[in-house]
Amino acid sequence: MKLKRIIVKTTLFFGLVIWTVLVTDCLQFYEKADDIERFRVLHMEKDALAEYDTAYQYGSPIFMQKLTERMLSGSFCLASENESVPTSFFYQYGPCKAVYKKYLNMYTIILSDIKYFPVPEDITGKATTNFEDSWLGERTYGGKRQHEGTDIMASNNLRGYFPVISMTDGVVEKKGWLEQGGYRIGIRSPAGAYFYYAHLYRYEDGIDTGDTVKAGQVIGYMGDSGYSKVEGTVGKFDVHLHLGIYIDYQGEEMSVNPYFLLKYFEGKKKKFYNKS
């Protein structure tokens, strides 16, 4: 009888210790998970992302699961595979399950359909593209605002030289002139992310609102249109593609930083030949 009481007390003690650890971890997890601004940066170093791709296959359910666990445990930063990550049980079945599922869903919506860099490589080598992390940088046209995307610049600054392709499968949801974005196309991916391609020189023939497009399909050509209420205005800035990525968050449209994903998919460019 005495031994039984000792066993019960010991079991309760260790159970309390385990529960305390879980609650402490969960509180720390919630503190990290509450920072939606850090989430929006999508800080995923390309080498670390490549390791996850090799181990789990980019876009697969297990890839999304492991990536989400790593992002949450690392304060929304994927920079090293060597840091410790709590077990999957902690996320999938523990007291933080609801928060984990929310972020798993958002990462899946953003990442799962991407297959290509949006500007192909010129196989002649006559021109190249480059881009920097300008996330939330200051912009002044139309009033002071923040830059919610990434600008991919053309080295030759020639409008119409570089084709623009869809990064994903999807449906053309928006097409036409915007004062800031010029000629733009908005494509909704199957998972639900909205990919915004702006400042186009022109659209590819046959592309219209409601059309279904495939990843890698040409949708237009890089240009310098925009910054005017007058449709067709060009020349207000250098030739480039502005890429934006948006998802629904609590009933409102929320932008996320494309830069780190572009750095990774820069190694997965299609190629094109310009005869000019």
Image (tube, helix red, strand yellow):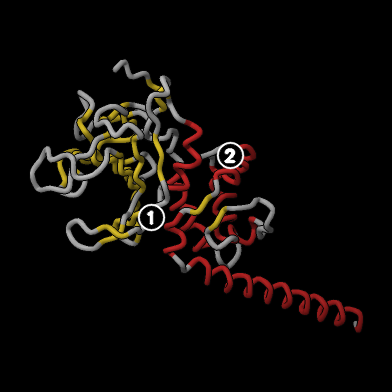
Give the left or right position of residue 167, taking residue 159 as reference: right
Q: Can see residue 109?
A: no
Q: Is residue 114 above or below residue 33?
A: above
Q: Considering only order in the chain, which callout, 1 or 2, is on the residue closer to the N terminus?
A: 2
Q: Could you tell me residue 119's position as x and y percent?
A: 37, 32
Q: Is residue 14 above or below residue 244?
A: below
Which image quarter: residue 234?
top left
> As shown in the figure, which amino acid type bears the numbered disc 1?
Trp
- Locate the N terminus by quadrant: bottom right
Which of 266/138 is in front? 138
Q: Could you tell me residue 221's position as x and y percent?
A: 26, 30
Q: Which residue is mark 2?
A: 53
Which image quarter: residue 211?
top left
The residue depicted at 29 percent of the width and 17 percent of the height is: 276
The residue depicted at 19 percent of the width and 49 percent of the height is: 180
Q: Secondary structure at mark 1?
A: loop
The residue depicted at 39 percent of the width and 43 percent of the height is: 191
Q: Which residue is mark 1?
A: 135
